[in-house]
Structure formats: C-alpha cells, structure tokens
Amino acid sequence: MKEKAYPAMSPSFGSQERVAERFLLQDLVPYVQEAVEEGSASQVLKLLERLHASDIAKLIQYLRGSLREKLISFIRPQLNPEILTRLDDTVREDVVALLGPEELASVVADLESDETFSVIEDLDQYQKREILESISSEERAILEESFNYPQYSAGRLMQREVTFSSSEWTVGQTLEYIAGEPNLPEVFLRCFRC
C-alpha cells in the first residue's frame, strides 16, 4: 500500500520551530483525521512528528469521540507527558480515562511536580489514590503537600523542586553544578542568591 504524501511529511517542510509559521494547525486537522479514520498509525505519527506538545494537545481537542480515542491509541506508546499539561481540563479527563491509573502514573513520572499536580488535581479520589500509590514516596509526599493548600493559591500551584548551592560559589560554579546534576528540574525559571 502506497503512503499518501501529506504536507507535514514534505522534506522542505522545515524544523519544529518553523511548523507554526509555515502550516496552520487547523489545516493539518483534516489530514490527521483522515489518517486516523483509515487506521494508519504510521501516517498519524509522521504528521505529528514535528509538532510541539501544545500543538498535539490542540489537535487532540479538535477531534471528537472515537477519533480522539484512536488518535490516543496511536500516540500512546510514545506519549509526551507535556501533552497532558496542555489539554483543556475536560479533554484531559477523557484522555486520563483512556490511559488508566498505572499508565498515567508512568507518564507523569517525567513531569515536574507542579505539572504532575495540574494533571491529577481534578481526578476523582480513587484515581488520585491509584496514581499516588504508583509513584515514589518522595514524589507522593510533594504532591500530597500541594493538596493541603487552598485551590488557586501559590502554595498549591508552585513547583516544589528546589536546589541549593554554596553562597561562596561563583555564577560559573553554580551553572556547572546545575549542568552536571542529573536529578534537577530541566527548566529553572528563577535563581536566587542569598
């Protein structure tokens, strides 16, 4: 069976950073929908391979019912956890229901604490308990602490991962430490020197 040539698969299509500039997401929806309807997981994955997680989340939101379920089944093996953080709350609930607690726990394990919290905070008590029981005790303690704060408060929304360095270190030494430490968050939004 010959694969169809979709626009996103063109070699001249460009890098991930250029996707938004050269091809509007809503123009991609019919191609993804067609590939999903045909049951072509390989076509779907090729169409999505250059998209950012937020664009894939939007695409998931455009699709309804069984098409959304099929799309999730195609991308499930390599589901980027960031997609879950970018979904509308109602759509996220549907996707979480498709994944189930164990798979969801595995997916959110790669997220920072604030992102994990945003994914699980609206789940029912049974789902929360299932996920919390499936993660490490350290991560569980961080997330459970977040539930103690009022909804929409800074304490509930903030990222809990923090690192400290010696006040004697130079900026260069601190950056060297951050770059060489594998257990730190991937992104630092603020650095404070006390």
Image (tube, helix red, strand yellow):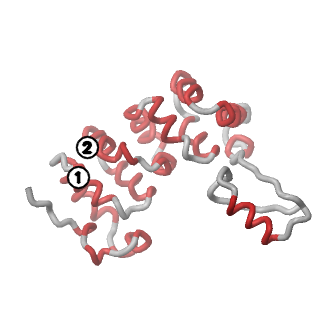
Residue at figure coordinates x 53%, y 21% from the top left: 126
Which quadrant: the N terminus? Answer: bottom left
Question: What residue is shown with label 2?
Answer: 67
Packing grade of label 2 (10 A; few <14, some 14-19, many >=20) is some
What amino acid type is highlighted by mark number 2?
Answer: Leu
Earlier in the chain: of badge 2 and badge 1, it is: 1
Asked where in the image residue 114 lies, by quadrant, the reply is top right
Quarter of the figure that contains the C terminus: bottom right
Element type at mark 2: helix
Q: Are marks 2 and 1 in contact (CB under 8 Å)?
A: yes
Question: Residue 164 appears at what percent x and percent y?
Answer: 81, 54
Instruction: Name the residue type under label 1.
Output: Gln
Residue located beneath label 1 in the image? 33
Q: Is mark 1 on a helix, strand or loop?
A: helix
Question: Residue 135 vs residue 99: left or right?
Answer: right
Would you identify the image quadrant in which residue 193 lies? bottom right
Q: Is residue 193 toward the left or the right of residue 149 in the image?
A: right
